[in-house]
Image (spheres, rainbow, N blue to C red):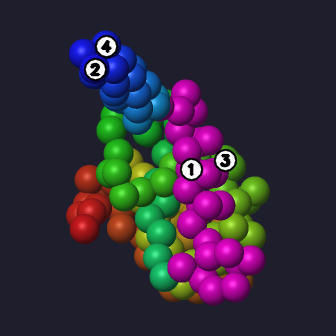
């Protein structure tokens, strides 16, 4: 019986360690995270749009080095044109960057592509995650 308890304890410790490692692993590219977040948040079969998304259009280096709001996704302005179709799934899009300049350019690009309800919130520090 004691041997069985020891085996159970060892198995529990190994399982806990493997779960902690899996939960702490991070993506090496913020752009991969952004791509996954934008793509994976739609409902099955893309039948219904999500209500809102906050997009940080700064570079990956700025996103990683200068900080970012956890409730936002990073799609650099230089990559935004490749994500327009995915962004069409959202009713409201809020854009941020370092000062608001790139977010303004992104807003113009998205509006030209036919998207509506786009807000330039300016600096990413203005985001208040709920």
Q: Report the front residue among 15 and 33.
A: 15
Q: Contact, CB < 8 Å: mark 2 with mark 3? A: no
The disc at residue 64 is none
Q: What element carries label 3?
A: helix
Q: What stretch is highlighted in magenta?
A: 26-50
- Residue for badge 4: 3
Could you tell me if residue 130 is visible in this image? yes
Per the image, the residue denoted by label 1 is 34
Is residue 30 within the magenta segment?
yes
The residue at the point 33 percent across, 20 percent down is 4
Tell which tag, 1 or 4, sits nearer the viewer. 4
Q: Is residue 130 left or right of residue 4?
A: left
Q: Which mark is residue 78?
A: 3
Quadrant for residue 71, please give it.
bottom left
The numbered mark, 1 or 4, whose residue comes first in the sequence reads: 4
User: For mark 2, what is the residue?
Assistant: 1
Q: Distance between the residues labelled 2 and 4?
A: 5 Å
Residue 108 in the figure: left or right of residue 129? right
Q: Do the residues labelled 3 and 4 touch (CB within 8 Å)?
A: no
Residues packed near mark 3 inside 10 Å, few (<14), some (14 to 19) or many (20 plus): few
Instruction: Say above or below: 130 vs 5.
Output: below
């Amino acid at each position: 019986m004691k041997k069985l308890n020891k085996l159970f304890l060892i198995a529990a410790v190994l399982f806990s360690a493997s779960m902690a490692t899996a939960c702490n692993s991070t993506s090496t590219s913020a752009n991969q995270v952004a791509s996954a977040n934008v793509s994976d948040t739609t409902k099955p079969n893309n039948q219904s749009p999500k209500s809102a998304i906050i997009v940080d259009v700064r570079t990956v280096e700025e996103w990683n080095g200068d900080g970012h709001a956890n409730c936002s996704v990073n799609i650099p302005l230089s990559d935004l044109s490749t994500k327009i179709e995915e962004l069409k799934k959202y009713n409201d899009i809020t854009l941020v960057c370092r000062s608001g300049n790139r977010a303004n350019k992104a807003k113009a690009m998205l509006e030209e592509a036919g998207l509506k309800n786009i807000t330039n919130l300016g600096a990413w520090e203005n985001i208040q995650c709920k």
